[in-house]
Amino acid sequence: ETIRLEDYRPTDFVLERVDLTFELDPAATKVEARLIFHRREGADPKAPLVLDGDELTLTALHLDQTELEAARFDAGAEALVIRDLPASEPFEIMIGTLIAPESNTKLMGLYRTSNVYCTQCEAEGFRRITYFPDRPDVLAPYTVTIIAEKTANPLLLSNGNFLGGGNYDEGRHFAAWFDPHPKPSYLFALVAGDLGVVEDTFTTASGRDVALKIYVEHGKEPRAGYAMDALKRSMRWDEQRFGREYDLDIFMIVAVSDFNMGAMENKGLNVFNDKYVLADPETATDQDYANIEAIIAHEYFHNWTGNRITCRDWFQLCLKEGLTVYRDHEFSADERSRPVKRVAEVRHLKAEQFPEDGGPLAHPVRPTRYREINNFYTTTVYEKGSEVTGMIATLLGREGFKAGMDLYFDRHDGQAVTIEDFVRCFEEVSGRDLKQFSLWYHQAGTPVVTASSAFDAARGTLTLSLEQMVPPTPGQSAKAPMHIPLRFALILPEGQVATPSAIEGGDVTGDVLHLTERQQTVTFAGLSGRPVVSLNRGFSAPVNLHLEQSAEDKALIARFDPDLFARWQALTDLALAELVAATQAVKAGQAVAVSNLLVDALLATAGDAALEPAFRAQALALPSESDIARAIGTGNDPDAIHAARIFVVRHVAQAGQTLFATLIDEMKVEGPFSPDAESAGRRALRTMALTYLSHAEENPARAKAAFDTANNMTERAHALALLAQVFGDTPQAAHALSDFRTRFADNPLVMDKWLSIQAAAPGHAALERVQTLMKEASYNALNPNRVRALVGAFVFSNPTGFNRPDGAGYQFLADQVLEIDRRNPQLAARLLTAMRSWRSLEDRRADAAAQALGKIAAAPDLSADVSDIVERTLKG
Ligand code: ZN
């Protein structure tokens, strides 16, 4: 059944208060919900009250303390309908339900993980706890009482402030919580069990003392220190940058080991996948530390963008997600290196969102229909949503954007609103019309911008011609021209920025060129020499830019543009063009050529001591195999792409052998481990140099030595990956893998790295390896992190293995999806999105992929999650 944006209407009843009592038991938890409603003014006086439910057993139903007679209600599988309710005065509905947390394998609603009770309610999990108007525009204050066996559950947590607790009856105790901030049901949380805690305090700008608590499994407390540090820095940053203070007496984070997503922003009680809380030098990589910092910040920032101001309906998901991703990106950029962070964001956007936007699952940032909302927690809603927010900041400038945010917080605090409400705040503070700009929310597909320039030496003018095209996407065949803000500069041979005396024919403000028509020509006058155009600097718009520019001009930008991001972009463009050509050569059985221009540009950047090491490492990271596939577009042969890329890597490696050996020495970080950005950057450049040098030498000795001497997980895991993925058939690789397993067998999060590294090792034998690994003690098909580490790494990060020509990889995914779907539909649907680019494969593989998709589509009893993805993937 399809839900449509245009069908939105408010509820007939207003919810005033919620009072919940839980008597916890793994097999039979009793939930009593007391809900005070009144009929909305102007609502139909005959309208029944319709509450959502999912897999519930109804045990009691009272209206104002009196049992309701059977004739006045219907309790169906998905709804409880109550008739003949008061026309205007408030009334209380009491609902008793019975649920079984221990058999809840969907990990939605109330479930068990390692003997802990926990909840996940976004988007529609609360209806698996009790009958309720389970939609984001129904806000109320909650009182929650939890009763549970005392020894097994010393800890009883819910949202808001602690009211009190004590003994209840023989062996049981209770705790009561009150959350004064009206909230929708998706932000409800309950946690109960026996956990260790790390505690701290935070004093807000206005002097409120907040208790901070991070709960983890006993014994893991020392690994929660970095998360606590990141939390305090996030709280301070939101005060300083956005003027947002925390608003309760306590802020809690609970780390759990079974979780479908990264984390969840429940009011005052965030629940996290433990992967994004736990870290220490022995077990976490620099990337793990960066992820923890970003996700702790993200969930904390939701307190204002998501919780205090929430979404009117789930079509507005980007209202909280795109905005909050933008905020966490800004936080990381402020805490670390801004250009390095931006490069990482754009890499991620291109690797994940561009393929989504260019395939059968493409959808607008603000969709207008869905069958299963869980399938819309996508990189389009999150990452492209963040880019759209960033473009508003580009259009309005830092001060204008801040003013718009202030108005948004002021005007909509306590409300459930829409994207239109959000955009209106920026229109009002700036006096700008953002109607055309808003197409970014409504039109799916990555715009293609084609640009070329011509210099007239006699007149001293440069003419820039621009054209935009938004490709058709499912359900949207024709598109209107968008407002595309392109940051630019005209770069002179030594890197100086040319300032033209006049600009004609274009809408330019400062260093932003506004492309608003299908075709536009801009002329820059008063130029004494020919400058090179640096366009879409900072990736100011998420577009596919085809800039007709010579390799020499690109190399000039790569070397001299004062904007580091633009340098990286030019280098990447240069490399991508050659990787595409190399792939065509491999396919045609011809010799592969790599230009000196590219090699020199890469090595010059890598060896430039004036640049920060993290940036130099990023400059050396060539486009990935999927970047190359996307650039080629159709008829893709992953084996040819892999062979071509390896050839280019070897060529660069041989040319830079001396430099790479020097970097390995120079970038060694002395002293005790610190996860700070600078040290991490040095490790990134050092490991990158090791990758190249190992390719040049075609010998695992250096990687094995690095593995044996590593004193931190970043370098250890990197060396292991090099051994397993480049030198997989050597005894050194086998030895390192078994050594690693012995050392970390008792740490599941570290064993996930061991599984992923092997699952991503290229070649057609990967499938058999993955099937063998599924029998390992460290694998557990019931735990989402384990499944993602092994099956996920194989289908998402191993193009040659997954896409082997006989289609066995697709058949394996189909079988996994069907099996996992029976217990955890969200996880199954997520894995299935690995098929989203199947139409861009060469015929034999595409046919095999279609066959596997057909097998899933034909299977009985599919979940809504999987059937939605499989149907769209086949159709689009
Ligand atoms: Zn979020």
Image (tube, rainbow, N blue to C red):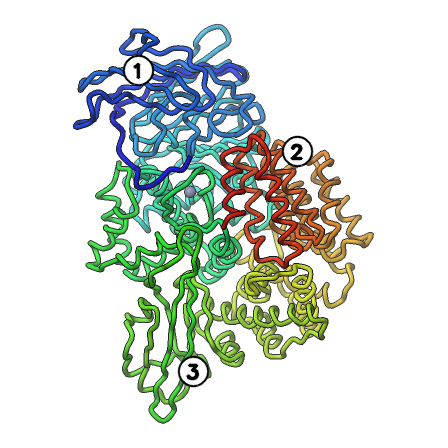
Q: Which residue is drawn at 28% across and 22% down?
A: 17
Q: What element carries label 2?
A: loop
Q: Earlier in the sequence, mark 3 or mark 2?
A: 3
- Up the image or down, 104 lies above or below 829; here it is above
- Closer to us: mark 1 or mark 2? 1
* Quadrant of the snapshot with the N terminus: top left
Q: What residue type is labelled 1?
A: Ile
Ligand 1 within 8 Å of disc 2? The answer is: no
State the image coordinates of residue 450 (x, y, percent, origin top left).
Answer: 43, 71
Q: Earlier in the sequence, mark 3 or mark 1?
A: 1
Residue 441's spot in the image, x, y percent?
Answer: 35, 52
For mark 3, give the secondary structure.
loop
Q: N-terminal of the two: label 1 or label 2?
A: 1
Total number of numbered discs in the rendering: 3
Residue 93, labelled with which disc?
Answer: 1
Tell me what residue is drawn at x 44 percent, y 24 percent.
Answer: 54
- Mark in front: 3 vs 2: 2
Answer with the quarter of the image where residue 79 lies.
Answer: top left
Q: How crowded is mark 2: few (under 14 residues within 10 Å), some or many (20 or more)?
A: some
| Label 3 crowd (10 A; few <14 / some 14-19 / many >=20) | some
Identify the residue under disc 2.
780
Query: Horizontal placement of 101 versus 205: left or right?
Result: right
User: What is the three-letter code of the residue carrying label 2?
Assistant: Asn
Residue 147 is at least partly visible in this image:
no
Quarter-of-image position of residue 623? bottom right
Residue 522 in which image quadrant = bottom left
Dot 1: within a 10 Å radius of its alpha carbon, few (fewer than 14), some, or many (20 or more) residues? some
* Quarter of the render that holds ligand 1: top left
> Which residue is label 3 attached to?
492
Do tag 1 and tag 2 residues touch (Cβ < 8 Å)? no
